[in-house]
Amino acid sequence: MEKYKIEKDSIQETLVIPLYGRRLCSQQFPGLYQDSTAAMLMEKMDYDFSPLERQANSLMQTFGALEVAMRQNDLAWEVRDYLNAHPRAAVINLGCGLDNTGRACDNGQCSIWNIDLPDVIEMRDRLLPPGEREKNLAFDLKDPYWMEAIHTDPADGAVLFAAGVFYYFTTEEVKSLTVDMARRFPGGRLVFDAAGQAAVRLMLKTWVKQAGIQDVGAYFSVKDARQELEPWSQLFSVSSRGYMLGYQSLHDPAVRPIHRLLAKLADGPMRLQIVRIDFVEYSHD
């Protein structure tokens, strides 16, 4: 089998670390998280994973893997919760990378839409070709035209989710995008991860330097989601939960006390959270 070559310093390389994190978490914390796709995808790649492997047992690497996994579990919980009430909904993965959450939540009736930049979708089409009721769409999320490319009956509903995406958007871009979504998908739900300003500065440190960005403060961060985001639109009903401990307990034999302490810091001072915006249905009077 010919392997898919991942070039150094390419957009595609940025997909490798979260993928490795999901595989690592499945190995280290099998009671909390399973992602069989991650190992299968790594087998299909021509890429040197050894620098990541060398760090695999370090505290920050295992906690980072746990963090990635908790985030995916939380988002999947929200998607399944929405599908319970709207079984034929569109499940829309924003900035999908090589994430397979849509398929993991598939109830046999929903439609699945994976959206990312053309380079990423080209890679996804090769490594994770879409199944039935599933489409991979090549769009920049900042171009709202992607919403028109999703053909779905508004009565069926839509649940949209984004993992690790909005940190790279300015607050204004997130506002504009979410308001557009609320208008396009009335009765839908959007869920995504967010963090306080200190955590966002930390996350964007390397990227900001490479991109030569001056005003990090313009990038999207959230302290109190309801207070800050609900005023953006009358169509928003906003809630949030801590993303390490807000959805499930970390009382698992593989989780060390230091991991639990870091989880409390993440959900507490760092304000790592899953934000849920329910889009209120509106009348066209």
Image (cartoon, rainbow, N blue to C red):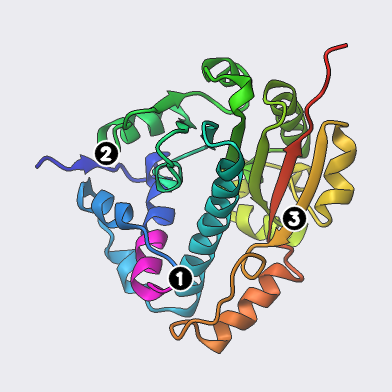
Q: Position of residue 232 (x, y in %)?
A: 86, 35
Label 2: few (<14), some (14–19) or many (≥20) C-alpha neighbours in 10 Å? some
Counting labels gives 3
Q: Position of residue 244 (x, y in %)?
A: 61, 68
Judging from the image, what secondary structure is the residue with disc 1 in? loop
Q: Tell me the residue that label 2 is attached to.
A: 127
Q: Tell me the residue that label 3 is attached to.
A: 240
Position of 122 compared to 243: left or right?
Answer: left
Per the model, the C-alpha gap separating discs 1 and 3 is 21 Å
Image quarter in which the N terminus is found: top left
Q: Which residue shows up at 41% across the image and 74% down it?
A: 31
Label 1: few (<14), some (14–19) or many (≥20) C-alpha neighbours in 10 Å? some
**Which dot, 1 or 2, sits closer to the camera?**
1
Q: Amino acid at mark 2?
A: Leu
Q: Amino acid at mark 3?
A: Ser
Judging from the image, what secondary structure is the residue with disc 2 in? helix
Q: Position of residue 284 (x, y in %)?
A: 83, 13
User: Magenta stretch?
Assistant: 21-32
Is the residue 157 above or below the residue 251 in the image? above
Image quarter in which the C terminus is found: top right
Question: Foreground residue, 159 or 52?
Answer: 159
Q: Kindly indicate the quadrant of the structure image that contains residue 190.
A: top right
Per the model, the C-alpha gap separating discs 1 and 2 is 26 Å
Position of 5 compared to 81: left or right?
Answer: left
Query: In the image, which disc is placed on residue 237?
Result: none
Q: Tell me the residue that label 1 is attached to.
A: 32
Position of 182 compared to 69: left or right?
Answer: right
Per the model, the C-alpha gap separating discs 3 and 2 is 34 Å
State which tag comes first along the sequence, 1 or 3: 1
Q: Name the main secondary structure of what is drawn in magenta.
A: helix
